Image (tube, coloured by chain):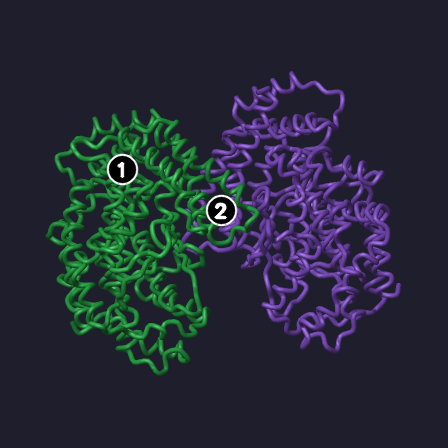
Chain colours: A purple, B green
Amino acid sequence: MTSYDSLLTELRSIALLESCGHVLGWDEQTYMPPGGAEHRANQLSLLAGMVHERATSPQLGDLLASAEQNEKSDDPDSPTAANLREARRKYDRSTKLPRRLVEELSRVCTLSQQAWVQARKDSKFADFLPWLEQVVALRREEADVVGYGDGVPYDALLDEYEPGMTAAEVTTLFAGLRDELVPLIAEIVDCGRQPDISILQRSYPVDKQRDFGTAAATAIGFDFHKGRLDEAAHPFCSGFGPGDTRLTTRYDEHHFPGAFFGTLHEAGHGIYEQGLNPAEFGTPMGTYTSLGIHESQSRLWENFVGRSRAFWNHYYSAAQQTFSTALTDVSEETFLWCVNDVRPTFIRVEADEATYNLHILLRFELEQPLVSGDLKPADVPAAWNEKFTQYFGITPPTDAMGCLQDIHWSGGGIGYFPTYSLGNMYAAQFFEAARRDLGDLDEQFAAGDFAPLKTWLNQNIHQRGQQYRANRLVEVVTGEQLDYRPLVQHLRAKFSELYGL
Amino acid sequence: MTSYDSLLTELRSIALLESCGHVLGWDEQTYMPPGGAEHRANQLSLLAGMVHERATSPQLGDLLASAEQNEKSDDPDSPTAANLREARRKYDRSTKLPRRLVEELSRVCTLSQQAWVQARKDSKFADFLPWLEQVVALRREEADVVGYGDGVPYDALLDEYEPGMTAAEVTTLFAGLRDELVPLIAEIVDCGRQPDISILQRSYPVDKQRDFGTAAATAIGFDFHKGRLDEAAHPFCSGFGPGDTRLTTRYDEHHFPGAFFGTLHEAGHGIYEQGLNPAEFGTPMGTYTSLGIHESQSRLWENFVGRSRAFWNHYYSAAQQTFSTALTDVSEETFLWCVNDVRPTFIRVEADEATYNLHILLRFELEQPLVSGDLKPADVPAAWNEKFTQYFGITPPTDAMGCLQDIHWSGGGIGYFPTYSLGNMYAAQFFEAARRDLGDLDEQFAAGDFAPLKTWLNQNIHQRGQQYRANRLVEVVTGEQLDYRPLVQHLRAKFSELYGL
């Protein structure tokens, strides 16, 4: 066995062990009885420790160095080069962190998250502040240890979720997006027309929602022979490995879009996981590119497909039959408008396709100065509310509906938010390219045929694993550089028509 | 930290890792999509390998030796002595097996089980025969490696499931049981009276069965805050660790007793798991005594409680209300008789409380000569049918309904069957002792009060872990030696009354 083969064998084995933790994590969120929490934490902590030990072992470092020595390649895009590049990136990042910092981060983030749950409940930012201060300080320390070249500390954090991306690039992209999005949303609000979204709060029996969502997820290409859909308080998708991908959603009888678009969203993640090359499981070539690219797949199916006129052209009569009490007097046009309602609201996870990005921009614009030290954690609520008022024209009445709403920071996830809007941009560019390659997608959707798009995504994105980093993947797939304009064009075209702008 | 403390820490950590596999195993049987089978097998094999490596490591051996050196105790029943005794037993047994034999057993048993599934389907013993030959040869080799002192090779296999028990002891007990049971069953058959068991095949809606079974499991003391009940093709109980015990059952609308008594049975196992001392998790003092003792707990709740007159005195009106269509014209007496129907049948897992033991005796009487070499695997079908006819008065029409019916041998489980009837004997003795200690149990059951019995089992059996081996535990708890007669008395008293013998 060459050192390269040995390296891959060890990476696969580590991933296999890690995937055991995914099963336990899924069970924790879906079926675990309350009394099992402490034992489960012990199990997960043991597995995580074992994975970390092997992923940072000197033996793995030796294998990696020796493989790099033996596998010289002129093609930086070859599978071998990609595997070595990404294995090196991950190994270096994890081994740079001293054990003390890893443990301290883990300890503080666990306690911080508990404190956040209570602080949000009480809407008392002061109770969360000391934890936010510690989290920011530790993550800032992590950035210094990991390093950020000529860039800024924020780059080192962003890089964990979106390898190779920099704060400067995101800043440029987000500035362009903001300059187009703020006026578009203002136009929508100012036009004075609004759909009657109370329609979506009528009675939609949960059993029927489950069947309808499962049928739609199947239709767009999620393979239930190799996956499941269950319920969880906080919906997610978890790929255990080849042949087993789990989706979760949550149902509310009086809120149709939540579970339905949530299911399409998670199914989009799931189709990505199911589309990875099973033979490459555990190696970079069999692993998703980045969180942003992952999000592009969920957003693409949720928004570009699931909220499109063509999609409901196909599905509305079935919806009307299934939810006859709720929809019998509702026209297709009205329903389409309802599921594309745009209006400023306080909570990110409930936001529409357009304003959602402003929620992300705001967070990114606070995270950067938080990490650089230009914004003190104590000043977050004021800064949040000021920016929120500026972007949305409304001011959060409480911190629970403002800067305390998201779990991310409490768990250490600083640098994560940008991947959501990057995902929207990637999705717009991929969708545009698919439309070029596949002809009239609307006609296909209207006929209930989603297979061409799914196959295109499989071939162009999923099967490539980490062969390219995210913005290079965009270039290879679309022929264009990463750009915010396709997203803006998509949003402007759709909402101009719906709102008659 | 003393070497004894270090030993316990390592044992706990190994058990924690092992318990991760239990979660994966449970998921495999309950929710895993079909496509996940191969990856799940890889995950479980990795975990099992890691557990085996740590459980047989020289470091663990050194810790054990050093702890034995330092912790001299005059009291062989002290927790420390028990922990060392059982840790030593387990370590010696696992380290004696050469890696080659462990791997060969694992490989052959996996293939053998697959061959058995097909052979049973086709009822073709010849297709299973080569595998049975290999399994017997390997297990016989294991017996030689493990050793059996002055006893017989079968002892070494039995010892895996029922530590300390010997074939000679089981032979004596089973002979006594057989001599009483065969005439009792003959009396029942010959009396010519039979309940109309078609009553139990009326319509019992599955949702109502689930609720009714869950309520009964809760009433007898299974804590759903620390456990769940799900569905699986082959019902089982899996204790993940403190605070998390999973039960499974299967429902058939037209067979009431299957799920109901199955749920009580698994709940009995679950109450044992939930009753173990959580502070001792992973050490012998926090582990169940033996498979036979485990089975005693499930049989006690299923049969001694769940099929008793007093139990239905309390529950029958609720059953009649819940399953009104099925039971409205059925008297309590008739129902009680139906759930205590005794008649010779071919399939062990469907057998009644009395004939069940004959199924076990037969298997034990074939396993011994199989292991000693006095019975050739090729001669198993003839020997099975001859014995079956002798004990039951009927002859299996096919091998699928005869010697191919059980999964155990195909998976290497030779020496396991006796624990089922030992469990029945232990249960009878424990129940008798509980009755002595707790007064009128019937009165308590008839009032729906199962807490005294559950608490008594917690204190006398569950919380003791492996402090005593099984037959010593019987002595400590009941003041009597292990004996078949309390079981016979229980059966004779119950069926004499029901059948008017």
Answer left or right for B37 relative to A479.
left
Residue A411 falls in which quadrant of the image? top right
According to the picture, the residue beneath numbered tag 2 turns out to be: A24
Density class for disc 1 (Cα within 10 Å; few <14, some 14-19, many ≥20) is: many
Which residue is most to the right? A501
Q: Chain of mark 2?
A: A
Q: How many marks?
A: 2
Residue A1 falls in which quadrant of the image? top right
User: Amino acid type of disc 2?
Assistant: Leu
Give coordinates of residue B416: x percent, y percent: 29, 45
Residue B215 - label: none
Instruction: Say what secondary structure mark 2 lies in.
Output: helix
Residue B22 falls in which quadrant of the image? top left
Give coordinates of residue B214: x percent, y percent: 39, 65
According to the picture, the residue beneath numbered tag 1 turns out to be: B371
Give coordinates of residue A79: x percent, y percent: 70, 29
In this view, B96 is above or below A444:
above
User: Amino acid type of disc 1?
Assistant: Val
At a point 18% along the width and 31% down the height, the residue shown is B149
Examine the rendering and report whether any part of residue B255 can be seen: yes
At a point 71% along the width and 69% down the height, the residue shown is A319
